[in-house]
Image (tube, grey):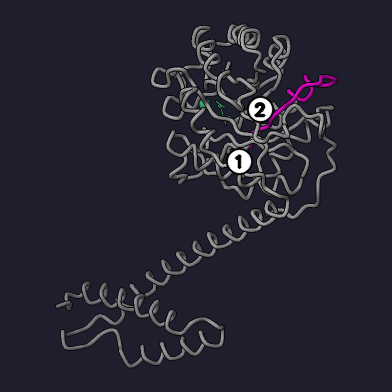
Amino acid sequence: MSTATHSSMKLAGEQSQLVSSKRPMVIAGPCSAESEQQMLQTALGLKKVKGVSVFRAGIWKPRTRPGSFQGVGTVGLEWLRTVKQETGLRTACEVANANQTAQALQHGVDILLIGAHTTVNPFLVQEIADALKGVQVAVLVKNPVNPDLALWLGALERLHNSGVIDLGAMHRGFSTLDSAPYRNHPKWEHALELRRQVPDLAMYCDASHIAGRRSLLRPVSQRALDLGYNGLMVESHHNPAAALSDAQQQIMPQELHMLLEALKKQHTPAEKLKQNAQLEKLRKEIEYLDDELLTLLSRRTKVTAQLGDYSKPVEKSVETPDPVRWDLVLENLLHQASTAGIDQAFVKTIFQEVRSQYARTHLYNYGLSS
Ligand code: PEP
Ligand code: MN
């Protein structure tokens, strides 16, 4: 993990549209704009939800496979404008190139979102940054799909270099081979490291794209609040079952109301935030060490299998593995454990378990088990 010093970005601070003293700010709305009726019905529901101040909807959808719903395009921006007029909610949508950026600005969108599939591409980010020269608008930059902090920071810097100072980061989790139980693995420590490097950056958590399913929205949102995030984004649709994209993770406005009520909005003092960040780092280190332990165990298993081949018994009466040798090995290990300050009984249990697993496999392989 990078230990670079604080970034020199000068941000909007108190003037930011992205932070509120009544933490957290909540952005909610459907994954995709589908029809004017769907937008209005959802927005009228969301207007009643205390805490929601921004309505989002995807106008152009980056989809993994062709043939999926690609978004309604420009007409959706008209509907966003209607939502703003009818409800007074501010609006947000994702833009992925200069043309979409210009159209969103023409339609009075308040907050631009840079999606995860755009943050990975410095050409596109630069194109958007160029389109925003001299424009005062708030921009939230999602983390890139892959856990590359420099890429995330780089996108923020490109926008900042164009004069965008009302900037925030949106944490939507990372694509990993095994993200279970999440849709996108949160890797909280990456987001915390970004905040360490750019302390004034507004931090949002896109709970929906991390969770990928309704049941995880609450723990993910709570974690973000506990870590001192400034805002949450939750996808909401008046009829999630009929949604044209991300149906399994959207919730109805009334459900969002219950979710927000259930979250404990304790004000987290700065000292506690620091402590949480430190905890996150230690958790990460333990995850890493567990991974190492597993790698070592797997290597040990392979080596013992080879050993087994060499000491293949010629007849059943040959006892294998050698118990006398094992006693000496164990004695030595326990001595090392005590020098290293590790509980001897603990070490003994672990190695006896490892050894009996070896013995079981070995004897079984040669048909010697009783
Ligand atoms: C979205 O917000 O609907 C979206 C497509 O998100 P992401 O860029 O995080 O995939
Ligand atoms: Mn979505």
Q: Is residue 135 above or below residue 7?
A: above
Which residue does the image show at 58% across and 34% down from the upper left?
Answer: 206
Q: Is residue 252 above or below residue 86?
A: below
Q: Secondary structure at mark 1?
A: loop
Q: In the rendered image, which quarter is residue 132 located in?
A: top right
Which residue corresponds to mark 2?
A: 114
92 to the left or right of 67: right
Give the residues drawn in magenta, as a range. Answer: 128-143
Q: Nearer the viewer, mark 2 or mark 1?
A: 1
110 to the left or right of 285: right
Which residue corresponds to mark 1?
A: 265
Q: Which is nearer the eye, 148 or 223? A: 223
Q: Quadrant of ligand 1?
A: top right
Q: Secondary structure at mark 2?
A: strand
Which residue does the image show at 41% across and 66% down from the upper left?
Answer: 298
Which residue does the image show at 69% across and 33% down from the upper left?
Answer: 22
